[in-house]
Amino acid sequence: MIRYISARLLATVPVVFGVTIAVFSMLYLIPGDPVKMMLSEFQTSPEQIARMRAQLHLNDPFFVQYGRFVWNGLHGNLGTSIRDNRPVTQEIFEVFPQTVQLAVAALVLASALGLALGILAALRQNSWLDIGSMMVATLGISMPSFWLALILILIFSLHFELLPAAGGGDLPHLIMPAVALGLGAAAIIARLTRSSMLDILRTEFVTTARAKGLRGRTVVLRHALHNALIPTITIFGLQFATLLTGTVFIETVFGRPGLGRLVVEAILNKDFPLVQGSVLIFALAYVVVNLVVDIVYAVVDPRIRYQ
Amino acid sequence: MAETLASRAAPAAGAHARTRWQMLAPRMRRHKGLMVGLVIVVFLALIAVFRDVVAPQNPIKIDVTAALQSPEPAHWFGTDQYGRDVFSRVVHGASISLTVGVIAVAIATTVGTMVGLVAGYYGRAVDALIMRIIDFMLAFPGILLALGIVSVLGPSLQNLMIAVGIAGVPFYARLVRSTVLVAKEQLYIEAARVIGVPIPVILVRHLLPNIVAPIIIAATLGMGITILQAAGLSFVGLGSQPPTPEWGRMITEGRDYLRDAWWISTFPGVAIMITVFGVNLLGDGLRDVLDPRLRI
Amino acid sequence: MGVARRAGVGAGIVLLAVALASVGAVTAAPSGATLTVGLDQEPPTLDPEASPSAVTFQIIPDVTESLLYQGLDGKILPWLASAYKISADGKSFTFTLRPDAKFTDGTPVNAEAVKWNFDRVVNPNYKAGGSLSALSGYAGSTVVDDHTVRVDFKAPFAPFLSYAAGGTLALVSPKATQAQGNEVNLKPVGSGQYVVSEYVPKDHITLTRNADYNRKAPWSDHQGPANLNTIIWKFIPEAGTRVTTVESGETQMISGLSLPSATLSHIATERTLRIDRNPYPGAPRIWVLNVRMAPTNDLKVRQAINYGINRAAITDSVFKGLGTTACAPLTQQTLKTPALCNAYPYDPKKAAQLLDEDGWKMGPNNVRQKDGKPLTLTINSINYGSGNLPEIELLQGQLLALGIDARIKSQARPPWYEDNYHCATNGPVLFLRSTDPDGLFALFDSANIGGNFNWACYSNPELDKMLQAGRETYDPAKRSAIYRQIEKLLVDQAITVPLVDEYSVWVVRSNVTGTKYNFSGYPILTDVKIGK
């Protein structure tokens, strides 16, 4: 177990390295002079540009700059946003908890709904409930989350005036974003739970348990569910990561402060330090979530070994 | 010698494919979901091709005297704030969304397949290097990768296809690689290699047929995700540009009018949903029929 | 329904608090209430001297004060300065400061502070915003005594009084500003009736009443501190969402910027809401035509565009209720020019004829061409995050009807500026909320090509002379005559396509009274009361 975990941790290192290289290189790949872009809102003299270049150490070789980027990043310094003139890390961590809150809320909702629907559908395979709920699930996967968000606003804010349409903070502000974000994930979890339940229900030990005279419900709860949940855990992790990035659209629709909205605005504003910083944090969060999921998975199911 | 063996293998593979098809066709026809999906996709493709017949009104023609009309016989889906016919825009949007989906998936599968074939076949250092790159691409969630690419290339419909396409590459590469790893152990591949058939020939003639089914399934299912991603990027302003009647863009444009003209945003959203639904049903069905064990 | 009910309860508690407060403190103004205002975007900075953006100046009048005040009627009144004197040569302005004014950090608003602020603006190491052009030709300030300061210019500068009354030259505390570093962008320290107590980026700004304020502001109905305890400015970019919040009572007031016309007419019928409308001064929404780049370097093409754009269609549709049809590069509120309103009546036939004469014949796909080259142009379109401004796609559609293939380059503020500085497109649509006709100097003086804001890239020595004359002329009648002449030249040369004379539009709940607006059309909320 320890060996697996350390191997898994070790495997993360090159990934993180690659991520930082990619994020750092973005500044070199954009067409045009980043310094001019940074100063563009204000009248710029050649001296100002030269000063800014020196200030940012842009005349150093690529790897020196990259080294500095990583070093500063490790010290919590990801540069200064061009538009707000504030530290990038500060901007990110001001809003990041809200994004996590939204993603967690969406995941809780998606899991509850998805598991319930998936188990029910599997137990009543080929019934109308099964076919109907799987149709709904497929529709759920096919729906653009941002469009669903607008429809929710149309119904619950504009028509019934039940829920606030914009902003962050308290629970009423969280409901619609979490639903809009989580419904797609609920559909995926439902489909997966159903199929892994069906797999387990077909296996021998369930049949054996049934043959031994255990009643249906006990079989399901004791044996099938436990085993069926294992593959679903991976999906939870994967879905959580997807939900994190899904906030890109949802936060924009609901005007919620968060990392998703931050990254979109930074891209539209060509605020490159902020783009780099927020993309980096997004990617690292994703890596960490996947890492945790893999380890949890290994703990739950010791058969897994690192290949 | 190598020539004759290779040329003898090819028709055999073709004959094999025919019998396989004959075996699969009835199963496909019996699969309800697959058929429904197929009907939806064919229907949408027809609409996209014959858009000028289905919706003869110019989708970008502005007429402010006809602005914000609710759905009525003259404008089935109403008009937007510029007086453009929403039905016409939705219909013309079908060709755009399908084109974006097909091209982006084509980019993703082509590049992904090549990379996956090479990694899987050569193994060792080549594989390790490619897989590290793939791993770190996978460290970026797809949409973020696309966002990053768009931020570098600049927003346009063309860059959108490239961005979403590239973002899909690692997924296909990994799928192809794992399939190749299994397939290359088979005896006839081993034989071909031993008698010195050139590697590109082995890859394309012998390995590729093995992975066609998974790729078709993955590409179909991936198409749905791709269309959603592309619409999402257009929605936040990083995709198609006006006056292009692209569905994601139309949803954005109607956003401020949600209260007084719900139809502007609603219909393009329904169109996206139906399209992706059809594609997903088709993909699910193909998987059930072609390769039920495939977990995608 | 739930939200509405909760808001009702909230208001009940607030009322109770007001009642208690008025029982407890007889002398103090009623306090305790909160006004939440929905704003369309977050300001780039709250530092008035650093901001290039109008958004800042919608928030700041409650926090910082200027030497003078210019009300809706255009009259200039004393504010921090109790009196001013202009030297005979028109180059020096001497301000007498009130002895009782204090910044909220306790330091006095004295001559030294004024000098420090103005020197700060022109300091090359400081990223000044609109303030820089408000101090054009600044030669320095002199502290005459503690309460008297003289501001000198290299040439007579008639618009300065209006600029000294504007938000860009509002004063911040030298002591606090030097101490706080970058924090000034979030919490500038002024001398006004509110202080910025909380700034949550991307979400809201909270202003708290300055209880020590003991003066009577020039617009105010009372002496002493503001009425409400707290004002919250909430950033809600989506116009539709903004409307929802004011209807539900989540906000009590919202900016009407880019509100869909349909929504405005719908609001007009709601008894719980009212619309405050005031005309904006300065340059209206104009499409500036880049005279350096083909095809807009051709006068015939520019004139054809002016004839071929149906401005009434714009004010009748997406700008319905948000403005009137513009005639010239200054709004009619700033300078009445009825003669220019008929300079280019909407006449697509005339437009087509001009283009035909010029050699642009109709080609395939309804796009005109000359020598095999299609008639295409690029509009530089600013995107604040929720898409193009509504007039842009209308322009595109109307140009297409003329046989002109217009591309929209939709981009965020920084790259949009960059292209404007480099004359890299056929021109942006812009507006300039200048409180003086001198705004035309920024827009058309040849010195401002490559800077702010001569984005037509138009260079005409004769015009430069007239613009300088306008600056140096104090006599109102003569000034107006000069600017009428300037406008005539600009219209004859078709340098711009004037589109909309805009209103400053705010949607307010009916129970909110006492909203006031300064000459720029920006709200002042110190006298606001919230009724039942």
Image: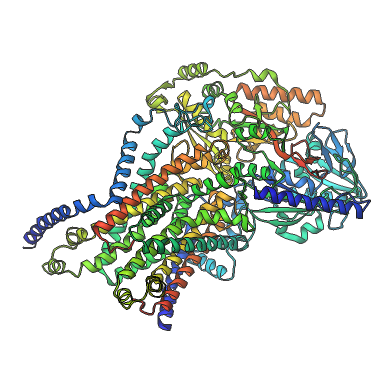
Tell me the quarter of the picture where residue C197 sits.
bottom right
Tell me the quarter of the picture where residue C512 sits.
top right
Residue drawn at x 32%, y 59% is B172
Q: Is residue A272 visible?
A: no
x, y percentage for residue B212?
23, 57
Residue drawn at x 30%, y 61% is B115
Q: Quadrant of the C terminus of chain A?
A: bottom left
Q: Nearer the viewer, residue C65 or A220?
A: A220
Question: Taking B143 as reference, is C104 left or right?
Answer: right
x, y percentage for residue C337?
70, 21
Q: Above or below — where is C421 with respect to A211?
A: above
Q: Residue furthest bottom?
A: A2
Q: Nearer the viewer, residue A294 or A56?
A: A294
Q: How many marks?
A: 0
Question: Taking A66 as reference, is A126 left or right?
Answer: left
Q: Nearer the viewer, residue A260 or C123?
A: A260
Q: Is residue C106 visible?
A: yes
Question: Taking A145 as reference, is C448 left or right?
Answer: right
Q: Quadrant of the N terminus of chain A?
A: bottom left
x, y percentage for residue B290?
24, 57
x, y percentage for residue A104?
54, 63
Q: Above or below — where is C493 with respect to B244?
A: above
Q: How is the image coloured?
A: rainbow
Q: Above or below — where is C3 with respect to B128?
A: above
